[in-house]
Amino acid sequence: MYMLKKTREDAVSPVVGVMLMLVVTIIIAAVVSAYAGGLSQGTQKAPTASMQCRVSNDGTWGGSTFDLVILGMDPAVPSKDVKIITSWKAKDGTNNVVTITGPNTTGTPNVHFTGGSYQAPLGFGPGVSQSMFSGSYYPDQHFGNYTLVAGTRMHNSAYGWNPTYGGYGVDVFSRYRYTDGNHYAYETDMDGMQAILGKEWWHLRPGDFVQVKLVHIPSGKIIFDTTTVVEG
Protein backbone atom coordinates (compact mmCIF):
# COMPACT_ATOMS: atom_id res chain seq x y z
CA MET A 1 0.00 0.00 0.00
CA TYR A 2 1.48 3.26 -1.06
CA MET A 3 1.15 6.44 0.90
CA LEU A 4 0.79 9.67 -1.11
CA LYS A 5 2.92 12.43 0.29
CA LYS A 6 1.47 15.91 -0.21
CA THR A 7 3.81 18.80 -1.01
CA ARG A 8 2.75 22.12 0.48
CA GLU A 9 3.14 24.99 -1.98
CA ASP A 10 1.20 27.61 -0.11
CA ALA A 11 4.38 28.82 1.62
CA VAL A 12 6.27 29.26 -1.66
CA SER A 13 3.71 31.44 -3.49
CA PRO A 14 3.80 34.37 -1.00
CA VAL A 15 7.60 34.53 -1.17
CA VAL A 16 7.56 34.67 -4.97
CA GLY A 17 4.86 37.33 -4.88
CA VAL A 18 6.82 39.50 -2.49
CA MET A 19 9.95 39.17 -4.65
CA LEU A 20 8.02 40.16 -7.75
CA MET A 21 6.60 43.18 -5.98
CA LEU A 22 10.08 44.25 -4.91
CA VAL A 23 11.40 43.90 -8.45
CA VAL A 24 8.52 45.94 -9.88
CA THR A 25 9.00 48.61 -7.21
CA ILE A 26 12.73 48.88 -7.96
CA ILE A 27 12.07 49.20 -11.70
CA ILE A 28 9.46 51.92 -11.18
CA ALA A 29 11.80 53.83 -8.85
CA ALA A 30 14.59 53.66 -11.44
CA VAL A 31 12.31 54.94 -14.22
CA VAL A 32 11.02 57.82 -12.07
CA SER A 33 14.56 58.75 -11.02
CA ALA A 34 15.79 58.78 -14.62
CA TYR A 35 12.80 60.87 -15.73
CA ALA A 36 13.29 63.39 -12.92
CA GLY A 37 16.99 63.62 -13.72
CA GLY A 38 16.19 64.33 -17.34
CA LEU A 39 13.80 67.09 -16.35
CA SER A 40 16.33 68.74 -14.08
CA GLN A 41 18.98 68.69 -16.78
CA GLY A 42 16.60 70.13 -19.39
CA THR A 43 15.41 73.08 -17.29
CA GLN A 44 17.54 76.19 -17.60
CA LYS A 45 18.39 78.32 -14.61
CA ALA A 46 16.76 81.74 -14.58
CA PRO A 47 19.11 84.74 -14.83
CA THR A 48 19.30 87.37 -12.12
CA ALA A 49 18.10 90.77 -13.30
CA SER A 50 17.83 94.33 -12.09
CA MET A 51 15.87 96.91 -14.09
CA GLN A 52 14.29 100.34 -13.91
CA CYS A 53 10.95 101.08 -15.60
CA ARG A 54 9.22 104.37 -16.42
CA VAL A 55 5.90 105.06 -18.16
CA SER A 56 4.76 108.57 -19.01
CA ASN A 57 1.76 110.19 -20.68
CA ASP A 58 1.52 113.96 -20.94
CA GLY A 59 -1.09 113.89 -23.69
CA THR A 60 1.41 114.38 -26.54
CA TRP A 61 3.28 111.90 -28.72
CA GLY A 62 6.70 113.30 -27.75
CA GLY A 63 6.03 113.23 -24.01
CA SER A 64 4.48 109.77 -23.82
CA THR A 65 7.04 106.99 -23.45
CA PHE A 66 7.80 103.51 -22.20
CA ASP A 67 11.32 102.98 -20.86
CA LEU A 68 12.87 99.83 -19.41
CA VAL A 69 16.59 100.06 -18.62
CA ILE A 70 18.63 96.98 -17.75
CA LEU A 71 20.78 97.81 -14.71
CA GLY A 72 22.17 94.29 -14.42
CA MET A 73 21.67 90.90 -16.11
CA ASP A 74 23.62 87.75 -15.24
CA PRO A 75 24.07 86.01 -17.57
CA ALA A 76 23.19 88.03 -20.67
CA VAL A 77 19.85 86.97 -22.15
CA PRO A 78 18.68 87.13 -25.80
CA SER A 79 15.47 89.15 -25.86
CA LYS A 80 13.85 86.35 -27.87
CA ASP A 81 14.04 84.29 -24.65
CA VAL A 82 11.97 86.85 -22.74
CA LYS A 83 8.32 87.83 -22.83
CA ILE A 84 7.02 91.10 -21.44
CA ILE A 85 3.63 91.27 -19.73
CA THR A 86 2.05 94.65 -19.00
CA SER A 87 -1.20 95.18 -17.12
CA TRP A 88 -2.98 98.29 -15.90
CA LYS A 89 -6.29 99.88 -14.97
CA ALA A 90 -6.90 103.59 -15.53
CA LYS A 91 -8.95 105.81 -13.23
CA ASP A 92 -11.83 105.77 -15.73
CA GLY A 93 -12.01 101.95 -15.49
CA THR A 94 -10.30 101.15 -18.80
CA ASN A 95 -7.88 98.24 -18.40
CA ASN A 96 -5.70 95.92 -20.45
CA VAL A 97 -3.18 93.09 -20.30
CA VAL A 98 -0.61 92.70 -23.10
CA THR A 99 1.96 89.95 -23.66
CA ILE A 100 4.89 90.71 -25.97
CA THR A 101 7.26 88.17 -27.48
CA GLY A 102 9.97 88.60 -30.09
CA PRO A 103 9.43 88.24 -33.85
CA ASN A 104 11.22 84.90 -33.81
CA THR A 105 8.30 83.44 -31.87
CA THR A 106 5.37 85.40 -33.29
CA GLY A 107 6.57 86.02 -36.86
CA THR A 108 4.57 89.25 -37.06
CA PRO A 109 5.77 92.75 -36.01
CA ASN A 110 3.51 94.36 -33.43
CA VAL A 111 4.00 97.93 -34.73
CA HIS A 112 2.63 98.86 -38.14
CA PHE A 113 2.03 102.23 -39.79
CA THR A 114 2.43 103.80 -43.22
CA GLY A 115 6.15 104.34 -42.69
CA GLY A 116 6.98 100.72 -41.84
CA SER A 117 6.74 98.05 -39.15
CA TYR A 118 8.86 96.66 -36.33
CA GLN A 119 8.71 94.72 -33.07
CA ALA A 120 8.40 96.90 -29.94
CA PRO A 121 10.00 97.68 -27.59
CA LEU A 122 13.00 98.86 -29.60
CA GLY A 123 16.50 98.22 -28.27
CA PHE A 124 19.23 100.83 -27.76
CA GLY A 125 22.74 100.80 -26.34
CA PRO A 126 24.76 97.74 -25.21
CA GLY A 127 23.47 94.45 -26.57
CA VAL A 128 22.16 96.09 -29.76
CA SER A 129 24.47 95.79 -32.80
CA GLN A 130 23.29 98.99 -34.48
CA SER A 131 20.49 101.43 -33.79
CA MET A 132 18.92 104.70 -34.84
CA PHE A 133 16.47 106.92 -32.99
CA SER A 134 14.05 107.68 -35.82
CA GLY A 135 13.18 106.68 -39.36
CA SER A 136 13.56 103.08 -40.52
CA TYR A 137 14.83 101.21 -37.47
CA TYR A 138 17.46 98.52 -37.95
CA PRO A 139 16.28 94.91 -37.62
CA ASP A 140 18.87 94.58 -34.82
CA GLN A 141 16.69 96.91 -32.74
CA HIS A 142 13.54 94.82 -33.00
CA PHE A 143 12.54 93.10 -29.77
CA GLY A 144 13.70 89.50 -30.12
CA ASN A 145 16.84 90.41 -32.09
CA TYR A 146 18.96 92.11 -29.42
CA THR A 147 20.53 90.89 -26.17
CA LEU A 148 19.70 92.10 -22.68
CA VAL A 149 22.84 93.19 -20.81
CA ALA A 150 23.64 95.94 -18.33
CA GLY A 151 22.91 99.25 -20.05
CA THR A 152 20.41 97.98 -22.64
CA ARG A 153 17.50 100.37 -23.01
CA MET A 154 14.10 99.16 -24.20
CA HIS A 155 12.14 102.17 -25.37
CA ASN A 156 9.16 103.37 -27.37
CA SER A 157 6.98 106.44 -27.68
CA ALA A 158 3.64 107.27 -29.28
CA TYR A 159 3.54 108.09 -32.99
CA GLY A 160 2.60 111.50 -34.33
CA TRP A 161 3.92 114.72 -35.84
CA ASN A 162 1.18 117.06 -36.98
CA PRO A 163 -2.52 117.04 -37.91
CA THR A 164 -1.73 116.12 -41.52
CA TYR A 165 0.28 113.02 -40.57
CA GLY A 166 -2.02 112.10 -37.68
CA GLY A 167 -1.15 110.25 -34.50
CA TYR A 168 -1.29 110.89 -30.77
CA GLY A 169 -1.59 114.39 -29.33
CA VAL A 170 -0.28 116.10 -32.46
CA ASP A 171 -1.61 119.58 -31.61
CA VAL A 172 -3.16 121.51 -28.72
CA PHE A 173 -6.63 120.39 -29.81
CA SER A 174 -5.86 116.66 -29.71
CA ARG A 175 -4.20 116.17 -26.33
CA TYR A 176 -4.81 112.72 -24.86
CA ARG A 177 -6.31 111.34 -28.06
CA TYR A 178 -5.45 110.02 -31.51
CA THR A 179 -6.31 111.63 -34.84
CA ASP A 180 -6.13 110.08 -38.29
CA GLY A 181 -3.88 111.45 -41.04
CA ASN A 182 -2.09 110.36 -44.19
CA HIS A 183 0.57 108.48 -42.14
CA TYR A 184 -1.61 107.06 -39.39
CA ALA A 185 -5.12 105.62 -39.10
CA TYR A 186 -6.29 104.70 -35.60
CA GLU A 187 -8.43 101.74 -36.64
CA THR A 188 -5.72 99.95 -38.64
CA ASP A 189 -2.31 101.19 -37.47
CA MET A 190 -0.35 100.69 -34.25
CA ASP A 191 2.41 102.69 -32.61
CA GLY A 192 4.95 101.58 -30.01
CA MET A 193 2.93 102.63 -26.96
CA GLN A 194 -0.13 100.78 -28.24
CA ALA A 195 1.95 97.68 -28.96
CA ILE A 196 3.37 97.60 -25.42
CA LEU A 197 0.37 98.77 -23.35
CA GLY A 198 -2.59 98.08 -25.62
CA LYS A 199 -4.73 100.09 -28.01
CA GLU A 200 -6.47 102.06 -25.26
CA TRP A 201 -3.31 102.93 -23.29
CA TRP A 202 -4.01 106.67 -23.68
CA HIS A 203 -6.66 106.41 -20.96
CA LEU A 204 -3.79 106.24 -18.48
CA ARG A 205 -3.16 109.46 -16.57
CA PRO A 206 -0.38 110.60 -14.25
CA GLY A 207 -0.78 108.75 -10.97
CA ASP A 208 -2.20 105.57 -12.52
CA PHE A 209 -0.28 102.30 -12.07
CA VAL A 210 1.21 99.96 -14.66
CA GLN A 211 2.55 96.52 -13.75
CA VAL A 212 5.44 95.25 -15.88
CA LYS A 213 6.74 91.67 -15.74
CA LEU A 214 9.54 89.97 -17.64
CA VAL A 215 9.38 86.18 -17.88
CA HIS A 216 12.42 84.09 -18.82
CA ILE A 217 10.87 81.66 -21.31
CA PRO A 218 13.37 78.73 -21.06
CA SER A 219 13.00 78.50 -17.26
CA GLY A 220 9.46 79.85 -17.00
CA LYS A 221 10.57 82.13 -14.14
CA ILE A 222 9.64 85.77 -13.58
CA ILE A 223 12.92 87.72 -13.54
CA PHE A 224 11.42 91.20 -13.10
CA ASP A 225 8.15 92.38 -11.62
CA THR A 226 7.40 95.99 -10.79
CA THR A 227 4.49 98.40 -10.52
CA THR A 228 5.35 101.85 -11.82
CA VAL A 229 3.43 105.09 -11.44
CA VAL A 230 2.54 106.86 -14.69
CA GLU A 231 4.31 110.20 -14.98
CA GLY A 232 3.03 113.34 -16.69
Image (cartoon, rainbow, N blue to C red):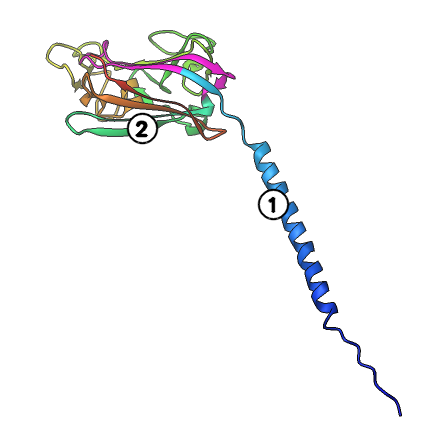
Q: Give percent across and percent down for residue 39.
A: 57, 37
Relative to residue 160, is residue 201 depicted above or below?
A: below
- Say how many tags the image has: 2
Q: Nearer the viewer, residue 223 or 164?
A: 223
Q: Which portion, as a residue range, is magenta?
A: 51-79
Residue 29 in view, yes or no: yes
Residue 138 in view, yes or no: no
Who's the residue at 60% across and 42% down the image?
Answer: 35
In the picture provided, is 173 more to the left or to the right than 197?
A: left
Q: Does the magenta portion include 181?
A: no
Instruction: Report crowding for label 1: few under 14, some 14 to 19, many 20 or more residues within 10 A (C-alpha).
Output: few
Q: Give percent across and percent down for residue 47.
A: 49, 21
Who's the residue at 47% across and 19% down the image?
Answer: 48
Q: Nearer the viewer, residue 129 or 218?
A: 218
Q: Residue furthest left?
A: 173
Q: Residue furthest bottom?
A: 1
Q: Nearer the viewer, residue 7 or 145?
A: 7
Quadrant containing the N terminus is bottom right
Q: Give percent across and percent down for residue 80.
A: 46, 23
Q: Which residue is mark 2?
A: 98
Instruction: Report crowding for label 2: few under 14, some 14 to 19, many 20 or more residues within 10 A (C-alpha).
Output: some
Circle 1 SS class: helix
In the picture provided, is 67 more to the left or to the right than 220?
A: left
Identity, as a three-letter code, of the amino acid under mark 1: Val
> Mark 2, mark 1: which one is toward the viewer?
1
Q: Which residue is mark 1?
A: 32
